[in-house]
């Protein structure tokens, strides 16, 4: 299998058919038809081209007419520019490979790819020269101007720029130690050096690594699971007590759910709901691998659950997902319509109301999202508190992604009084 050809195929599915790159790349790993080195290159090429797509398209369009150029050829040229500018790849090899791929797409395009790719070696073409000076920094970093403006307006220009820069930095893999199966002391003595682990500065039993551990002993035995630190912090902040009754309203893929069980030492009861039937099996796999035994899982819309009372409630709400752009860079390429935004915010509000109806006096609620958007986060909570004077805000935090080598995230803890 040709690595650049595979990367092109994946990128076409992402850009043309709105597929998620991480799922397509996972499928590629499962085929086991490429070497680890080639798969690593495909990952780098796919993620990099998506991350900088807005910039790459801007530069390539200085030379071609996109309305008259086959879309796959355009993607191929974006890949070429990414390799030349960001990977510092040798031009001869990049161009030769792309010409061969172009011949498979359309023999008549091979000459165009050769000609344009040679022009892309000219670094003067790489400069961003536009009238809108505000857009130079976002465009250079492959970030949409509309989202840059939004984050700047919601927070500040410096925080928006910091978020942009961190979103393009390759992250380490974040692992949560599963203390249901192994102690921190035993784990660190046995695996700290072996997997070159670095302790998290946010939660003591989270670790960072550069190694893929999915098929390794520590993962297969359920000693660890892959979970971003800020995602884990939502359950950590809720901190449900053993023998308590807990509600997890939107459970997939199960990271926060299994973390809640771990905090509770498998004692008590967690009722977990997930709307999408296709994700139930994934959650069940995680429950089994991690040895979680106190969860009652049901495939059901959280808005339709019975309003029994709970001691602790976690609402990890559906959101725009801007906080995980580093993991899923294609998210920044979709701009939601006003109608889509309104529907999403309404759904979050309805879920919060359901959480309220499932709360009694002293019930603690955590509302979290993996986005950077005041309307979905701070403003959503402010409106909720205005509607319910018996809810007190205990903790609120926005993570922008650069704090602990983490994803962007929002967490708010409240209590019914």
Image: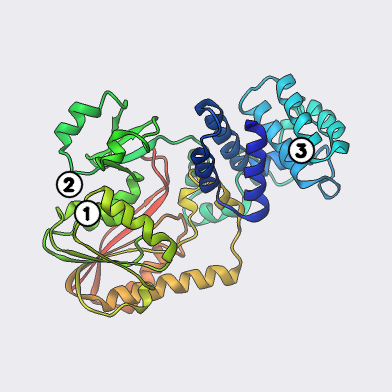
Residue 234, image x and y in percent? 29, 54
Find numbered disc 1 in the image and state the secondary structure of the residue it sits on: loop
Q: Which residue is mark 2?
A: 180
Q: CA distance from mark 2 to mark 1?
A: 8 Å
Q: Nearer the viewer, residue 78 or 404?
A: 78
Q: Is residue 171 left or right of residue 219?
A: right
Q: Given contact means CB atoms under 8 Å apart, are the residues at marks 1 and 3 in contact? A: no
Q: Is residue 296 visible?
A: yes
Q: Nearer the viewer, mark 2 or mark 3?
A: 2
Q: Is residue 369 left or right of residue 265?
A: right
Query: On the rendered image, what quadrant is the C terminus found in?
Result: bottom left
Write down the quadrant of residue 94 in the picture.
top right
Query: Which one is earlier in the sequence, the residue at label 2 or at label 1?
Result: 2
Write down the quadrant of residue 44 in the picture.
top right
Query: Which one is earlier in the sequence, the residue at label 1 or at label 3?
Result: 3
- Give the residue displayed 56% in from the left and 28% down from the top: 38
Q: CA distance from mark 2 to mark 3?
A: 53 Å
Q: Nearer the viewer, mark 1 or mark 3?
A: 1
Query: On the rendered image, what quadrant is the N terminus found in?
Result: top right
At label 3, counting other C-alpha atoms closer than 10 Å, the crowd grade (few under 14, some 14-19, many 20 or more) is many
Q: Which residue is mark 1?
A: 292
Query: Which one is earlier in the sequence, the residue at label 2 or at label 3?
Result: 3
Residue 262, image x and y in percent? 20, 51
Q: Given contact means CB atoms under 8 Å apart, are the residues at marks 2 and 1 in contact? A: yes
Q: Is residue 50 left or right of residue 412?
A: right
Q: Which residue is mark 3?
A: 60
Residue 273, image x and y in percent? 33, 68
Residue 279, image x and y in percent? 41, 60
């Amino acid at each position: 299998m040709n690595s650049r050809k595979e990367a092109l195929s994946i990128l076409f599915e992402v850009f043309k058919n709105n597929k998620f790159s991480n799922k397509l790349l996972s499928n590629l790993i499962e085929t086991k038809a490429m070497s680890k080195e080639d798969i690593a290159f495909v990952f780098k090429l796919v993620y990099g081209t998506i991350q900088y797509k807005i910039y790459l398209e801007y530069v390539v369009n200085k030379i071609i007419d996109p309305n008259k150029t086959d879309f796959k050829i355009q993607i191929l040229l974006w890949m070429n520019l990414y390799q030349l500018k960001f990977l510092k790849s040798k031009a001869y090899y990049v161009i030769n490979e792309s010409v061969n791929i172009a011949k498979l797409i359309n023999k008549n395009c091979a000459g165009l790819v050769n000609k344009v790719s040679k022009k892309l070696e000219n670094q003067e073409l790489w400069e961003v020269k536009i009238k809108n000076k505000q857009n130079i920094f976002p465009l250079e970093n492959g970030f949409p101007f509309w989202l840059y403006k939004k984050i700047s307006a919601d927070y500040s220009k410096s925080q928006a720029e910091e978020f942009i820069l961190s979103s393009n930095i390759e992250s380490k893999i974040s692992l949560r130690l599963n203390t249901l199966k192994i102690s921190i002391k035993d784990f660190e003595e046995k695996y700290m050096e072996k997997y070159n682990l670095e302790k998290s500065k946010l939660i003591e039993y989270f670790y960072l690594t550069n190694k893929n551990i999915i098929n390794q002993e520590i993962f297969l035995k359920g000693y660890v699971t892959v979970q971003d630190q800020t995602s884990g912090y939502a359950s950590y902040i809720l901190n449900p007590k053993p023998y308590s009754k807990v509600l997890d309203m939107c459970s997939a893929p199960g990271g926060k759910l299994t973390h809640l069980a771990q905090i509770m030492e498998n004692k008590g009861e967690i009722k977990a709901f997930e709307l999408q039937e296709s994700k139930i099996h994934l959650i069940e796999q995680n429950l089994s691998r991690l040895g979680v035994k106190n969860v009652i899982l049901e495939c059901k819309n959280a808005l339709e659950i019975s309003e029994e009372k709970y001691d602790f409630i976690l609402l990890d709400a559906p959101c725009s997902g801007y906080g995980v752009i580093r993991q899923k860079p294609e998210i920044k390429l979709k701009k939601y319509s006003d109608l889509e935004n309104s529907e999403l915010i309404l759904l979050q509000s309805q879920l919060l109301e359901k959480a309220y109806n499932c709360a009694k006096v002293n019930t603690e609620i955590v509302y979290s999202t993996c986005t950077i958007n005041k309307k979905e986060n701070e403003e959503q909570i402010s409106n909720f508190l205005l509607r319910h004077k018996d809810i007190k805000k205990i903790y609120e935090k926005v993570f922008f992604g650069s704090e602990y080598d983490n994803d962007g995230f929002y967490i708010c803890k409240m209590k019914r009084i």
